Amino acid sequence: MKLAAEAIGTFVLVLGGCGAAVLAAATTTTDGTAVGIGYLGVAVAFGLTVLAMAATFGGVSGGHFNPAVSLGLAVAGRLPWRDLPGYALAQVVGAVAGAAVLFTVASGRPGFDAATSGFATNGYGERSPAGYSLLAALVVEVVLTAVFVLVVLGATAPRAPKALAPVAIGLALTLIHLVSIPVDNTSVNPARSLGPALFAGGPALEQLWLFVLAPLVGAALAGALHAGLFRTPGHRD
């Protein structure tokens, strides 16, 4: 049941967040009217999606929907290490399924090409929305993933108000996207990056390593920091 919840939640995260980027960020109607939601709209879409899924499945699986979050929780002592591979696999399966549905929908518009459009993939250098370097993307992914995982750890701690956890997590993800969409289209989630990249192929897959490695590093740092600074002796929080 936990793994199904993680797969479904990640499916919706990719379909909702990446779907907003692919289908609605910069688009026009058939009569030429511009109706795109822009970076702000995409950031809000990601935040609302994770908020809704965390509220729906948080009580079932913890509502990670992100291998980096699962890793951070494991490092912090909040997820058994034996559960980590299953969580990560379920999240990747959900992300690929979400990207597959999105690809099917996006392909319904004449002239669509996942490779040339970018298909909400992450990138640096020439593939960065604003031309940011590999180093810039690396730093932003490590730091912002660490911030996100710290929010998740704090918001879901036993002594934190449970009802506010999805709101805090959703708002944090929105803020992170507002900061980093221009840099690299925002990953902070290896599964979210992998799903669209499989359909875009080419350069998206060539640069995928950074958007798998950097979020995992940031998450591990956050987990260790939380365990070292905020977990009191005798408590697993």
Image (tube, rainbow, N blue to C red):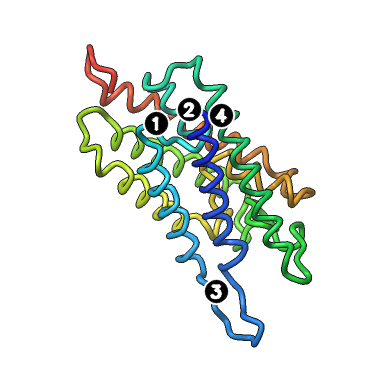
Q: Rounded to the nearest whole Å, what is the CA distance between mark 1 and mark 2?
A: 7 Å
The answer to which of marks 3 and 4 sits earlier in the sequence is: 3
Q: Residues within 10 Å of mark 4 (few under 14, many from 20)?
A: many
Q: Which residue is denoted by mark 4 in the rendering?
A: 88
- The residue depicted at 42 percent of the width and 36 percent of the height is 63
Residue 185 position within the rendered picture, expressed as x and y whole percent measured from the top left: 57, 55
Secondary structure under tag 2 reads loop
Q: Which residue is denoted by mark 1 in the rendering?
A: 60
Dividing the picture into quarters, in which one does residue 198 lie? top right
- The residue depicted at 63 percent of the width and 56 percent of the height is 120
- The residue depicted at 53 percent of the width and 27 percent of the height is 87
Residue 53 position within the rendered picture, expressed as x and y whole percent measured from the top left: 42, 45
The answer to which of marks 3 and 1 sits earlier in the sequence is: 3
Secondary structure under tag 3 reads loop
Give, as a three-letter code, the residue at label 4: Ala
Quadrant of the drawing holding the C terminus: top left
Q: Are marks 1 and 2 in contact (CB under 8 Å)?
A: yes
Note whether 31 is above or below 157 in the view shown.
Answer: below
The one nearer the camera, 140 or 202, is 202
Q: Rounded to the nearest whole Å, what is the CA distance between mark 2 and mark 4?
A: 14 Å
Q: Rounded to the nearest whole Å, what is the CA distance between mark 1 and mark 4?
A: 16 Å
Q: Rounded to the nearest whole Å, what is the CA distance between mark 3 and mark 1?
A: 35 Å
Q: Rounded to the nearest whole Å, what is the CA distance between mark 3 and mark 4?
A: 33 Å
Q: Residues within 10 Å of mark 1 (few under 14, many from 20)?
A: some
Give, as a three-letter code, the residue at label 2: Met
Secondary structure under tag 1 reads helix
Q: Are marks 1 and 4 in contact (CB under 8 Å)?
A: no
Identify the disc placed on residue 36: 3
Note whether 151 is above or below 181 in the view shown.
Answer: above
Q: Are marks 3 and 4 in contact (CB under 8 Å)?
A: no
